[in-house]
Image (cartoon, rainbow, N blue to C red):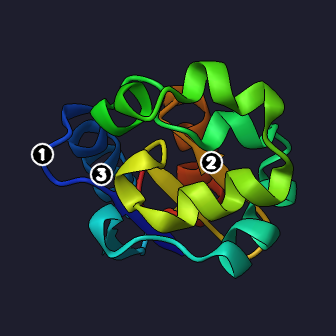
Amino acid sequence: MYFINYSKCSTCQKAKKHLERMGVDFIDRPIKEGVTKEELQIWIPLSNKPIQKFFNASGQLYRNGNYKERLPQMSDNEKMEALASDGMLVKRPLLVGDNFVLVGYNEKEYDEIGEKYGKKQ
């Protein structure tokens, strides 16, 4: 599974430590490397969340791009293109497995991943 994160993000650091503590194997992938539109086309349905939840609404890029006002008028295709244009626009961390995608950090969700995929409790 991929753990897509920004190393300077305290929430990402907390989530990463959670995975390591549970013994979950993952590939660390910096968000600055970005995500592709093709990946998003797979990941968004797996997350069971609307595409808007993939936007880092607290980020500078989001604010400077006026996405709060723009998103309601954008098509899903335009939203995916925007997310794929700069990884820093993407909410983090993302935890991507074969049949799930977690957006952001939720301790309960990470506990469930740890129980299913971890080596230690």
Disc 3 crowd, CA 10 A, few/some/many (<14, 14-19, 20+): many
- Give the residue at mark 1: 8
Instruction: Name the residue rendered at 60%, 52% in the picture.
Output: 113
- Give the residue at mark 3: 16
Q: Is residue 114 above or below residue 73?
A: below
Residue 41 image position (x, y, % from top left): 80, 69
Q: Is residue 1 above or below residue 86?
A: below
Q: Which mark is residue 61?
A: none
* 8 relative to 118 in the view: left or right: left
Instruction: Name the residue rendered at 29%, 31% in the picture.
Output: 60
Instruction: Name the residue rendered at 34%, 63% in the picture.
Output: 31
Image quarter (top left, top right, bottom left or bottom right) of the N terminus? bottom right
Under mark 2, the amino acid is: Leu
- Which secondary structure lies at badge 3? helix
Residue 35 image position (x, y, % from top left): 51, 71
Query: Marks 1/3: CA distance?
Result: 12 Å
In this rendering, the label closer to the viewer, 3 or 2:
2
Tell me which corner region of the image, top left, top right, bottom left or bottom right, holds residue 74.
Answer: top right
- Give the residue at mark 2: 102
Under mark 3, the amino acid is: Lys
Going from N to C along the chain, the mark reached first, 2 or 1, is 1
